[in-house]
Structure formats: structure tokens, C-alpha cells
Image (spheres, rainbow, N blue to C red):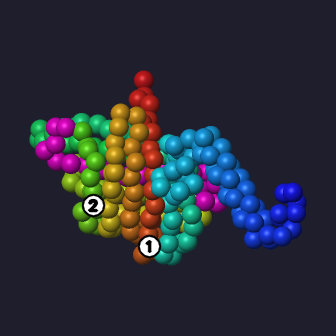
């Protein structure tokens, strides 16, 4: 009887097939999401890299995708004149052959007795060397394939979206330049984990 009905009503067969296909897709998606962690979902959606990693695009005189591990350190320091400073250091390292690289960023705030919090921090201007105390962001980049000269941050910003005891999430838009005038623009996201304190 069912066979006869289907033969007489092709539209019915088409409708039943569509319902079965939809049901199958719903079942597959439910199974997939049931076994997907929050970190995996974030990575697939391009939200933020999984904990301890970063994904940064370099453009300008050099074009490459930089990935690797990232850790952070938070400290309270005091200048020689007694001025308190809050600092946050980001250490990014990648070991992908010729793209082996070290990136470092220091966020510093004067007259700040509390730790660095979520917010946007900007490069204050051209900084040609390592400074201990200043307001804003200092950054450098050493990349094997780009030669021996380091790049220093010229302008841009780092945004800390959230910060917890053991990890933080953020993004950067930084322009760096070396002594030969070569420039790179770094844009991307990171999810850093707290670096173990040295004994």
C-alpha cells in the first residue's frame, strides 16, 4: 500500500527524503558540538586562538603568517625616583623553520599601584631602545628570515579584552620598523597563559 502511494505521489517521496536528510544533518551537528570544547570552537570560528597560542599576520616589506606560543608576566615595579609602575609583558615565540621568531611587548603604566587591567594601550611614539619605565606599549620583533636587525614598535595598539589569573585574551595592531627603514605591520589575536615564575 505504501509503495503504491509513493508511486502515485512522487511529491510525497521527495518530501520524505528531505525530512530524512534534515534529520540526519541535525543528528550530525548535535554529535559534533557535543564533543567540541570551548577552545576548539573558538579556534574554528576565528574568535581567539586556543590557550597559549597566537595567530598574527605580518604585512608590509614582509608578508607571512606568524604562529606560536605566547606567555605573559605581570609585575609591580618602582622607578628610582619612587614612582610606581604596573607592567605586563607578552612573550611570543615561533619555531617554524625560516619563520623562527621572537616578539616581545611591554605594557607599562606610570603611577599605577594596581596590576594592568583590560583595556587598550598604545605605542607612545618612536622608541629606539629598551626602556624600563614609560606609559604605553614598547615592542620588538626578531625574525630569522628578515635579517639580523631587530624591528621596534613605531605606532599602534594592543587591546586586552579579558584578563584572569592564569590567562588573558587580546589583539594587536602594531607597526614596527628597523634601522634600515624596513617596516612590518602585525595584526592578530592571542590567548596568553601566565609564565611560570623563575625560582
Q: Decide if residue 136 is on the left or right side of residue 162.
A: left
**Quadrant in the picture for residue 163:** top left
The one of 78 and 90 positioned closer to us in this rendering: 90
Q: Quadrant of residue 85?
A: top left
Please indicate, yes or no, whether residue 88 appears anywhere in the rendered image.
yes
Does the magenta-highlighted stretch encompass residue 37? no
Whole-angstrom CA distance, mark 1 to mark 2, is: 18 Å
Q: Quadrant of the N terminus?
A: bottom right
User: Is 56 left, or right, of 170 in this rendering?
Assistant: right
Residue 189: x %, y % from top left: 45, 56
Q: Nearer the viewer, mark 1 or mark 2?
A: 2
Q: Which residue is denoted by mark 1 in the rendering?
A: 183
Q: Position of residue 149 (x, y in %)?
A: 48, 64
Q: Position of residue 198 (x, y in %)?
A: 42, 28
Residue extending farthest top: 199
Q: Residue at x 48, y 75 (%)?
A: 60
The x, y position of residue 119, in whole percent, is: 26, 52
Question: Magenta segment range?
Answer: 92-114
Residue at 34% across, 51% down: 161
Q: Secondary structure at mark 1?
A: strand
Residue 79 is marked as none
Please tell me which residue lies in front, 167 or 75: 167
According to the picture, the residue beneath numbered tag 2 turns out to be 122
Q: Is residue 32 visible?
A: no
User: Who is closer to the viewer here, 17 or 94?
Assistant: 17
Amino acid at each position: 500500500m505504501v509503495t503504491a502511494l509513493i508511486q502515485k505521489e512522487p511529491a510525497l517521496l521527495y518530501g520524505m527524503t528531505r525530512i530524512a536528510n534534515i534529520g540526519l544533518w541535525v543528528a550530525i551537528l548535535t554529535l559534533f558540538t557535543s564533543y567540541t570544547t570551548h577552545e576548539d570552537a573558538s579556534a574554528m570560528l576565528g574568535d581567539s586562538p586556543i590557550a597559549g597560542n597566537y595567530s598574527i599576520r605580518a604585512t608590509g616589506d614582509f608578508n607571512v603568517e606568524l604562529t606560536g606560543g605566547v606567555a605573559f608576566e605581570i609585575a609591580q615595579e618602582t622607578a628610582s625616583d619612587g614612582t610606581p609602575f604596573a607592567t605586563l609583558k607578552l612573550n611570543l615565540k615561533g619555531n617554524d623553520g625560516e619563520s623562527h621568531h621572537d616578539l616581545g611587548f611591554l605594557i607599562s603604566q606610570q603611577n599605577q599601584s594596581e596590576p594592568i587591567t583590560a583595556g587598550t594601550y598604545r605605542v607612545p611614539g618612536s622608541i629606539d631602545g629598551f626602556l624600563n619605565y614609560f606609559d604605553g606599549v614598547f615592542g620588538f620583533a626578531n625574525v630569522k628570515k628578515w635579517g639580523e636587525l631587530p624591528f621596534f614598535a613605531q605606532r599602534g595598539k594592543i587591546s586586552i579584552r579579558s584578563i584572569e589569573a592564569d590567562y588573558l585574551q587580546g589583539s594587536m595592531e602594531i607597526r614596527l620598523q628597523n634601522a634600515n627603514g624596513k617596516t612590518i605591520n602585525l595584526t592578530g589575536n592571542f590567548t596568553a597563559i601566565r609564565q611560570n615564575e623563575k625560582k
